[in-house]
Amino acid sequence: MSEVAKETGYFKSFDGTPIYYEVRGQGEPLVFVYGIACLMNHWHHQIEHFSKNYKTIVFDLRGHHKSSQINSDQNLNIPSLADDLVGLLQHLNIEKAHFAGHSFGVPVLLSAYEKDPDLFKSLILINGFSKNPIKGMFGLDIVEPFFFSVKNQYQKNPEFWNQIWRKTVNNPIAMTVAGLLGGFNLKLTQFKDIEVYARGVSQLDLAVFIPFFEALMEFNGDLILPKIHCPTLIISGENDNVTPQQFQVEMKSLIPTSELVTIPYGSHCTHLDFPDYVNLKIDSFLTGPQFKT
C-alpha cells in the first residue's frame, strides 16, 4: 500500500474487547473510521496519500476482522464503538485529532464527538447520515422489512443463514448489483476493491452485522449536529443511492461550522470512485484558514 512504516497493535477497550489498529506516518493525527461490514482496505487510497504528511490511524470496528473477539454481545452498538474510538486515542496518547468517517462511520464519529468534543480538531463526513437511511434506500421501501424478515429467520437457524450470507455476498453478480444500485461507480472504482469489500462483508458473522444494522436504524444524531463546533467537511456523492445526498445536505444545514462538497458521478464510495479528487478536497480542507493560528 505504501512505503511508510506501519505500526500495528491491539488495545483492550472498556469491556476488555481487543481492538486492532494500524498507525502510519508522522504529523497531525488523522483517524479513519470505515462503515458497517467494511474493512481497512476501503481507505487504502487515503492512507497511502495522507501518511506522507499526517499520522494516519485506522482500526477494525469491534466484531470486525482482527477485532472479532468481542467480550460482550450487549456492546454491539454505536455508543460502544464510540467508546472504542475514544479509548484508542487515549491508548495512543493523542489529545486531539482530525477524524474522517464513511457511511456508518459517521454516526460513530457523531457519538464519539458527543462523548468527548475536545478530542476533535476537525470532522470529515463522507456519504454519511445522522439518522436512519434505510427507508427509501436504493429508491425502494423494501430494505427494512427484508432485514427484519432475515433477522427472524436467522434467529431460527443461525448456521444456515450465515452460509447463505457468505455465498450471496461474495460473488461477482452481487458485486455488480451493488454497483448498479449506487454502492460503487462501476466505471471508476477498481473491481478488485469491490472484490476485497465483498470478501470482507461475507466474513462478518450475522450475529455481529444484525445488531449493528439495527443500531444504525435506531440512531438519531440530529441533536448532536448543532453542538459541533470544530471545522467540518461533508462529502456527498451525486449518484449515491445508499445514503442519498439529502442526508448530507441536512447535516450541512445543522452543523454551523460545516461545508459541503458534492462529487459529480460519485457513488456511495466516492473516496474509491475519485480518490485523487477526494484527497485533494480533504487536503485543501485540512490546510485551510480555519486551522491557521
Image (cartoon, helix red, strand yellow):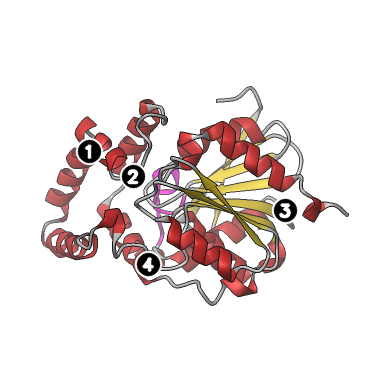
* Alpha-carbon span between mark 4 and mark 2: 18 Å
Which residue position holds label 1?
A: 174
Q: Picture quarter containing residue 256?
A: bottom right
Percent of width and height locating residue 180: 28, 40
Tag 4 near tag 3, CB within 8 Å: no
Query: Quarter of the image containing the N terminus?
Result: top right
> Can residue 83 be seen?
no
Q: Is residue 47 above or below residue 154?
A: above
Which residue position holds label 2?
A: 182
Residue at figure coordinates x 40%, y 31% from the top left? 193
Tag 3: Cα neighbours inside 10 Å, few (<14), some, or many (≥20)?
few
Camera-side mark, 4 or 2 = 2
Tag 1: Cα neighbours inside 10 Å, few (<14), some, or many (≥20)?
some
Residue at figure coordinates x 26%, y 53% from the top left? 206
Residue at figure coordinates x 70%, y 47% from the top left? 285
What kind of element bears circle 1?
helix
Judge by depth and name the residue closer to the eye, 51 or 277.
Answer: 277
Tag 3 near tag 2, CB within 8 Å: no
Which residue position holds label 4?
A: 132
Which residue position holds label 3?
A: 94
Three-letter amino acid code of the residue under disc 2: Gly
Mark 4 or mark 2, earlier in chain: 4
Tag 2: Cα neighbours inside 10 Å, few (<14), some, or many (≥20)?
many
* Alpha-carbon span between mark 1 and mark 3: 40 Å
